[in-house]
Image (cartoon, helix red, strand yellow):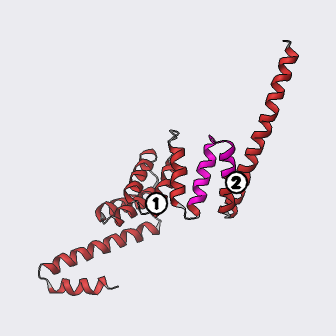
């Protein structure tokens, strides 16, 4: 076979592949455009087209997971984030976002595990400490929650949300202490427990 014939055969094979790749990228870009406009349903449709045409396009799974999260479809988001994680990508943001979906889905242990992974990959990721603290607080593990809020505050001293979350955890601990003191016969503690727990 001549050199020109081989070159012609390669061009015949590559042209449709290039058109296919351009089509996939158009859907991906359109999905990003919809996502940035806040039209998450249309973004999901476009990312799904990409995935149907190119199932190994990891960025489409990640972005669709973010769009599912924005729509409150936490299990779908978890599924897409997990597909990306299963490709052995070690990215703190990825674990953080799956942790958010687990947290919203009230699966606190899995959220904590993902925040642990986030922090292992990026020990200065303040939001991971805050959100892990929230997961601990919802499990009534207030001391652990306070530790995480303290760490978040040390990383980002002007974050008022961390102070608020820590204040809520301290308040809950104070109520526990009032209750314990009340149960052991301190009348003022009973009064304070009743007064503050009704607010």
Residue identifier under label 1: 156
Q: Secondary structure at mark 1?
A: loop
Q: Given the current orientation, which residue lies at the most extreme front position?
A: 52
Q: Residue at x 46, y 60 (%)?
A: 156
Residue identifier under label 2: 46
Q: Is residue 185 above or below residue 2?
A: below
Q: Residue at x 46, y 55 (%)?
A: 99
Q: Given the current orientation, which residue lies at the most extreme left position?
A: 185
Q: Residue at x 74, y 54 (%)?
A: 30
**What's the magenta bit mostly, secondary-structure-wise?**
helix
Q: Between disc 2 and disc 1, whose residue precedes?
A: 2
- Give x and y (percent) for residue 52: 67, 46
Q: Is residue 66 magenta?
A: yes
- Give x and y (percent) for residue 70: 58, 63
Q: Given the current orientation, which residue lies at the most extreme top position?
A: 1
Q: Is residue 59 magenta?
A: yes
How packed is label 1: few (under 14 Cα within 10 Å), some, or many (20 or more)? some
The Cα–Cα distance between marks 2 and 1, rounded to whole angstroms, is 37 Å
Q: Which residues are magenta?
A: 48-68
């Amino acid at each position: 076979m001549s050199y020109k014939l081989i070159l012609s055969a390669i061009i015949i094979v590559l042209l449709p592949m290039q058109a296919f790749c351009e089509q996939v990228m158009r859907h991906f870009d359109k999905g990003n455009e919809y996502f940035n406009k806040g039209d998450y349903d249309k973004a999901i449709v476009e990312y799904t087209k990409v995935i149907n045409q190119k199932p190994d396009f990891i960025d489409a799974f990640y972005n669709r997971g973010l769009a599912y999260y924005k729509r409150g479809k936490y299990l779908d988001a978890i599924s897409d984030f997990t597909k990306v994680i299963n490709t052995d990508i070690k990215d703190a943001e990825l674990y953080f976002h799956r942790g958010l979906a687990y947290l919203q889905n009230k699966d606190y242990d899995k959220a904590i595990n993902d925040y642990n992974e986030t922090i292992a990959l990026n020990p200065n990721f303040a939001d991971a400490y805050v959100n892990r603290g929230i997961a601990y607080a919802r499990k009534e593990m207030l001391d652990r929650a306070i530790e995480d809020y303290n760490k978040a505050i040390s990383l980002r001293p002007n974050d008022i949300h961390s102070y608020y979350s820590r204040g809520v955890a301290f308040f809950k601990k104070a109520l526990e202490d009032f209750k314990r003191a009340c149960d052991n016969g301190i009348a003022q503690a009973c009064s304070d427990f009743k007064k503050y727990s009704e607010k």
